[in-house]
Image (spheres, coloured by chain):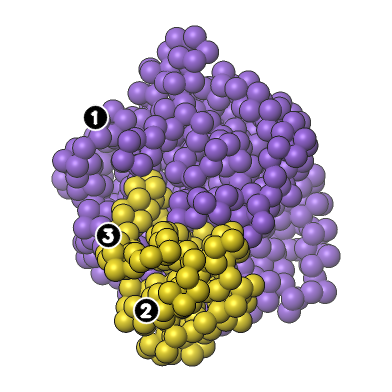
Chain colours: A yellow, B purple
């Protein structure tokens, strides 16, 4: 069976470092599938206006297209190699929960994410997506500095 | 809805009396406009709010309550049977994780709630209790519970017959289920009903959903900072609303979206704190509510007076049967239209049975209503029209005084809440009006802009003038929506029953199941 690694990207430098690390891992493993994932932060329990609700489906499509174009496609472009298959995914939801869910669904052996770079006040209080993922993941997580 | 029909009428009457002496002299342009408007719309207003002969019971209230009762029986008490399921739906237990990023049941519900929670819950209840006594609360709760079935019916249809466009946007509401549903059943007249509904919806949006809100918000602000011209409030409100609905300034809407639920929670929280402080009196208060419901405890009109006020305020507050909620709920992402029906039945529960009852209990428990020395009956005010209150307050000032009696600074929070609720109601109704408008004239950026600009202009007018006749007219327009909507619902309800039967069967067989999250 092919080993699978889920790489969580955030569109910043730390995500790229995670990607580079995962690529190196995959090369060492040999037969490996990389699933590159970008999560659009979204909560079903947020408050919206009626007009936003009516436009939501359209906006969601736009968000997915934009994430694919700006984050996923450039990331995938440099990854193809011998024995390595690469796929890209864009999902909506809580970042930590969604990365974990995708990893479980694909029976991945590892999750690779970048370390959260900026530490604002909110992150100190509520924790970053990365720390939430480390705390709650069902799959081994590698955090790349 | 946040209407204060009785309050407005009373205010109008007093203005009319003091103004009568001057009326013989020159009428200003404003007065002429008001007069002309009142003359033109008077018959319509009188028709909608006409009482049954020999009573003061408006037939429109009976129309709403009878409909709610019919739907309750027709769907075999759906509001109780599927209550737990509604909660599970809202909490996302049946939501497909692959639909993440689409409108959730929770979002559709809270959006609709922000359009109904407001002045009706704060001021309207005070009017009901002030006139009908504590017993009005009982009838209000009963009407709220029955209204859950009306919401269920209209919101299921709203989702079932909405328009979904190729770009992913949706439009829904009574005008769509009237035209498409009637056509499906092979009945004539669906388009005519949809046309009538749209006209009333536009008028209601500009009136009760706009001018009345602006007017009351200005009254609140000037009550705190002192009197100043209303057009200033109007311009500020119009500018902010313009920025949100035309400019698409998400940040303002986002702030409102977060602050308004917070205000709602704060309001209920404060009420609970006050009830806890007076925990020993809660039993007594409920005793008053039950006793008053059937005897009236000496209020004007007795038991019937309490019943009228309770029914009226519930209908005015939760809008069940009006059709507005069907527009708000129709954007949800679901494969089963009926799931949004289940979710929507929580709306009258939260709005009327919880929030309105909280207001009522606080007013009763803090002893705002004056009783005779024996504590057996209420003392009426000098005019004999309402119960005498400490400080002669009524409407929003009665609620304010009740909260202020226990938490001295709360009236300021309440004032802010009223202004914010007014703002969120305007945003909601601008959308309802817009949907009716685009149903009539077609969708398109320029056409939508025309309505949005008109909407903003009416905010200034609403805040600036004391437009008694206009407000009466817009109330009437909103209830005219209910006349058309409920008429259509009677024909379409069998479609909802089919959905209900199919859905419950699949729920039982396990075909519809929870997702693991």
Disc 3: host chain: A
Q: Nearer the viewer, residue B221 or B96?
A: B96
Residue placed under numbered mark 3 in the picture: A69
The quadrant in which residue B445 appears is top left
> Would residue B333 be found to the left or right of residue B375 on screen?
left
Disc 1: host chain: B
Residue placed under numbered mark 2 in the picture: A20
Q: CA distance from mark 3 to mark 2?
A: 19 Å
Whether residue B495 is visible here, answered yes or no, is yes
Dots 1 and 3: beta carbons under 8 Å? no
Q: Position of residue B193 (x, y in %)?
A: 42, 20
Q: Secondary structure at mark 3?
A: helix
Which residue lies at the image location 39% right of the left edge and 24% below the top edge? B194
Q: Nearer the viewer, mark 1 or mark 2?
A: 2
Q: Are marks 1 and 3 on the same chain?
A: no
Which residue lies at the image location 60% right of the left edge and 22% below the top edge? B495
Residue neighbourhood size for the residue with mark 1, other residues' Cα within 10 Å, grouped as few (<14), some (14–19), many (≥20):
few
Q: Is residue A83 above or below residue B350?
A: below
Q: Nearer the viewer, residue B297 or A132?
A: A132
Q: Position of residue B513 (x, y in %)?
A: 70, 45
Name the disc covering residue B441, or none: 1
Q: Nearer the viewer, residue B361 or A49?
A: A49
Residue neighbourhood size for the residue with mark 2, other residues' Cα within 10 Å, grouped as few (<14), some (14–19), many (≥20):
some
Q: Are marks 3 and 2 on the same chain?
A: yes
Q: Is residue B255 above or below residue B383?
A: below
Q: Is residue B273 above or below residue B495?
A: below
Q: Is residue B178 above or below residue B364?
A: above
> Would residue B104 be found to the left or right of residue B438 on screen?
right
Q: Position of residue B186 (x, y in %)?
A: 49, 9
Mark earlier in primary sequence (3, 2): 2
Q: Secondary structure at mark 1?
A: helix
Residue neighbourhood size for the residue with mark 3, other residues' Cα within 10 Å, grouped as few (<14), some (14–19), many (≥20):
few
């Amino acid at each position: 069976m092919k080993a699978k690694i889920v790489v969580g990207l955030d569109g910043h430098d730390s995500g790229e470092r995670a990607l580079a690390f995962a690529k190196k891992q995959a090369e060492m493993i040999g037969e490996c599938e990389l699933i590159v994932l970008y999560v659009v932060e979204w909560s079903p329990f947020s408050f919206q206006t009626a007009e936003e609700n009516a436009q939501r489906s359209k906006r969601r499509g736009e968000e997915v297209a934009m994430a694919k174009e700006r984050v996923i496609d450039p990331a995938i472009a440099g990854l193809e190699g011998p024995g390595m298959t690469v796929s890209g995914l864009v999902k909506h939801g809580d970042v930590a929960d969604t990365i974990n869910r995708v990893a479980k669904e694909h029976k991945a052996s590892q999750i690779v994410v970048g370390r959260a770079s900026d530490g604002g006040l909110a992150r100190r209080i509520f924790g970053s997506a990365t720390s939430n993922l480390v705390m709650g993941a069902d799959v081994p997580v590698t955090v790349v500095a | 809805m946040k209407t204060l029909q009785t309050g407005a009428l009373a205010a109008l009457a007093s203005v009319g009396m003091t103004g009568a002496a001057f009326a013989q002299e020159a009428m200003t342009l404003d007065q002429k406009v008001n007069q002309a408007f009142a003359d033109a719309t008077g018959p319509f207003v009188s028709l909608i709010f006409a009482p049954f002969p020999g009573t003061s019971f408006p037939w429109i209230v009976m129309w709403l309550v009878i409909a709610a009762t019919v739907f309750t029986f027709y769907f075999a008490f759906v509001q109780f049977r599927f209550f737990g399921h509604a909660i599970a739906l809202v909490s996302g237990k049946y939501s497909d994780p692959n639909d993440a990023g689409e409108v959730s049941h929770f979002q559709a519900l809270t959006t609709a709630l922000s359009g109904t929670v407001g002045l009706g819950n704060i001021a309207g209840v005070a009017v009901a209790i002030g006139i009908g006594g504590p017993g009005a609360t009982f009838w209000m709760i009963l009407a709220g519970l029955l209204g859950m079935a009306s919401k269920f019916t209209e919101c299921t249809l709203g989702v079932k017959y909405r328009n979904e466009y190729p770009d992913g946007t949706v439009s829904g509401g009574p005008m769509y289920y009237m035209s498409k549903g009637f056509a499906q059943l092979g009945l004539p007249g669906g388009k005519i009903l949809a046309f009538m509904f749209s006209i009333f919806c536009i008028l209601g949006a500009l009136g009760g959903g706009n001018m009345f809100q602006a007017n009351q918000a200005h009254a609140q602000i000037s009550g705190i900072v002192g009197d100043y011209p209303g057009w200033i409030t109007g311009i500020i409100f119009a500018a902010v609303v313009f920025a949100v609905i035309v400019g698409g300034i998400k940040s303002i809407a986002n702030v409102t979206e977060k602050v308004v639920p917070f205000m709602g929670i704060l309001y209920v929280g404060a009420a609970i704190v006050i009830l806890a402080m007076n925990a020993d009196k809660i039993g007594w208060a409920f005793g008053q509510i039950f006793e008053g419901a059937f005897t009236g405890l000496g209020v004007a009109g007795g038991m019937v007076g309490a019943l009228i006020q309770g029914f009226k305020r519930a209908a005015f507050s939760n809008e069940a049967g009006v059709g507005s909620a069907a527009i708000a709920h129709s954007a949800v992402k679901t494969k089963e239209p009926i799931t949004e029906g289940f979710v929507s039945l929580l709306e009258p529960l939260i709005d009327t049975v919880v929030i309105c009852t909280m207001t009522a209990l606080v007013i009763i428990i803090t002893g705002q209503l004056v009783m005779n020395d024996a504590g057996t009956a209420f003392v009426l005010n000098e005019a004999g029209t309402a119960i005498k209150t400490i400080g002669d307050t009524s409407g929003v000032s009665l609620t304010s005084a009740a909260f202020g009696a226990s938490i001295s600074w709360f009236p300021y929070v309440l004032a802010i809440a009223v202004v914010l609720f007014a703002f969120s109601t305007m945003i909601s109704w601008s959308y309802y009006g817009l949907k009716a408008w685009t149903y009539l004239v077609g969708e398109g950026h320029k056409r939508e802009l025309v309505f949005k600009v008109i909407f903003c202009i009416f905010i200034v007018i609403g805040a600036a003038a004391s437009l008694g006749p206009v407000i009466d007219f817009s109330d009437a327009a909103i209830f005219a929506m209910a006349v058309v909507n409920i008429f259509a619902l009677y024909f379409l309800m069998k479609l909802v029953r089919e959905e209900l039967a199919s859905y419950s069967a699949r729920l039982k067989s396990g075909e519809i199941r929870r997702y693991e999250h």
